[in-house]
Image (cartoon, grey):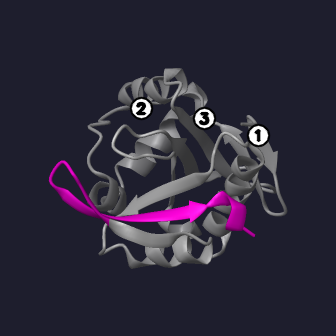
Amino acid sequence: MRSSYTISRLSLDKIGAHDANFIFELVNLPDWKRFNGDRNVTSRAAAEVYIEGMVTNPDTECWVVRLKQEKPPVGIITFIKREYLQHPYIGFTFLPEYRSQGYAYEATGTVLEEVKLNTAFTHVHATVLKENQKSIYLLEKLGLRYEKNVRVKNDELLLYTIALSVYN
C-alpha cells in the first residue's frame, strides 16, 4: 500500500507521531466512542502510544486525511486485518464539521482502488453498528453490501463486504 495519496480535494498520508493532537481529539469525540469504543487515549502521550501501536502492527494501515489546500487533518482511513474477519477491514472516521461533504467517500474510494490493484485481496469487509446509518449509507455508496450480523465482544455488528472484482 502506498504511504500517501493526493486526490482532487484531499491528501492522505500515513499516520505518525506528529498526528497525536489530532488523534487525541478524534478518538475522544462522542461519536467515536459511541461507534468505535473508548480507546482510553487520555492525553497526547497516550495518543502517541496509540499511534505507535498502529504504525508497528503489520496488519494495520492508517492514513490521516487532510484538505489539500489548508492541510488540516479532517479524518482517518484504516485498512486492518482483524482476526475475527476472513478478509481485511476498511474503516473511516471524520471530524463532525467535515462530514457529509464527500470527503470520506473520496478518501475511502481511493484506498479501495489501491486495494483492488493488489491481487492478494479478493474482498474487503467493513463492520458497523446498525445505529450508524450515515456509515451504512457510505458503505453502500462505495459498493459494499450487507452480508450478515457478527458478534464482536458485546456488540452486534453488521458485516458489509465487497468483492473487489465488482468494485467500480
Disc 3 secondary structure class: loop
* Magenta-colored stretch includes residue 73: no
**Placement of 122 over or under 143, stated as above or below:** above
Residue 19, located in which quarter of the rendered image?
A: top right
Assign the magenta stretch its main secondary structure. Answer: strand
Mark 1–mark 3 distance (CA, rounded to whole Å): 10 Å
First-in-chain label (2 vs 3): 3
Mark 2 Cα-neighbour bin, 10 Å: few <14, some 14–19, many ≥20:
many
**Residue pointed to by mark 2:** 47
Disc 1 secondary structure class: strand
Asked if the residue at tag 2 contacts the one at tag 1, i.e. Cβ–Cβ closer than 8 Å, the answer is: no
Residue 80 image position (x, y, % from top left): 50, 41
Per the rendering, the mark at residue 15 is 3
- Would residue 75 be seen by someone viewing this image from the given angle? no
Asked if the residue at tag 3 contacts the one at tag 2, i.e. Cβ–Cβ closer than 8 Å, the answer is: no
The amino acid type found where label 1 is placed reads: Ser
**Residue pointed to by mark 1:** 4
* Magenta-colored stretch includes residue 163: yes
Mark 3 Cα-neighbour bin, 10 Å: few <14, some 14–19, many ≥20:
many
State the extent of the magenta-drawn residues as a range. 149-168
Asked if the residue at tag 3 contacts the one at tag 1, i.e. Cβ–Cβ closer than 8 Å, the answer is: no
Which circle, 2 or 3, is nearer the viewer?
3
The amino acid type found where label 2 is placed reads: Ala
Give the residue drawn at x 36%, y 72%.
132
**Placement of 3 over or under 73, stated as above or below:** above
